[in-house]
Image (tube, rainbow, N blue to C red):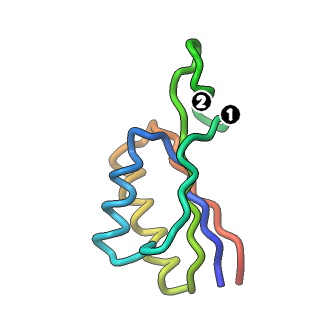
């Protein structure tokens, strides 16, 4: 079993969900709609200085589905290289 966390700007959230849907992956997920923080791209604090926020999509799945999820996220990252899309994977 794997736990995948996708952290991304709200601006690409629908693109990620559509890419997952096309691959029939990530059908069951938990979404945390508004998260703030600092990563390797610009800060996202939802305030007047740094107005953007991210979302987190958490998916538990097997290895075959994880491959499809990685492909979907990679596709979206390729189209939106500056949006700070990250995927973290835990599990065997």
Mark 2 sits on what residue?
44
Mark 1 sits on what residue?
38
Residue 89 x/y as whole percent: 65, 68
Q: Is residue 5 above or below residue 80?
A: below
Taking the view exactly as shown, the residue that stands out farthest to the right is: 91
Q: Residues within 10 Å of mark 1 (few under 14, many from 20)?
A: few
Identified at 44% across, 60% down, the residue is 73
Identified at 49% across, 86% down, the residue is 64
SS of the residue at dot 1? loop
Q: In which quarter of the image is residue 80?
A: top left
Taking the view exactly as shown, the residue that stands out farthest to the left is: 22
Q: Is residue 13 left or right of residue 62?
A: left
Identified at 54% across, 34% down, the residue is 53
Residue 16 x/y as whole percent: 39, 56
Identified at 59% across, 19% down, the residue is 47
Callout 1 touching callout 2 (CB < 8 Å): yes
Quarter of the image for the C terminus: give it.
bottom right
Q: Distance between the residues labelled 1 and 2?
A: 6 Å
Q: In this view, does 4 lie to the left or right of 14?
A: right
Q: In this view, does 3 lie above or below 82?
A: below
Q: Is residue 32 above or below residue 35?
A: below
Taking the view exactly as shown, the residue that stands out farthest to the top is: 48
Residue 38 x/y as whole percent: 68, 33
């Amino acid at each position: 079993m794997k736990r995948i966390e996708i952290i991304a700007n709200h601006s690409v959230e629908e693109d990620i969900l559509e890419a997952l849907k096309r691959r029939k992956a990530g059908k069951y997920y938990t979404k945390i709609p508004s998260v703030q923080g600092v990563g390797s791209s610009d800060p996202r604090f939802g305030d007047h200085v740094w107005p953007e926020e991210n979302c987190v999509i958490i998916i538990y799945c097997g290895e075959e589905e994880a491959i499809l999820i990685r492909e979907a996220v990679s596709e979206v990252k390729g189209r939106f290289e500056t949006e700070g899309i990250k995927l973290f994977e835990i599990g065997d």
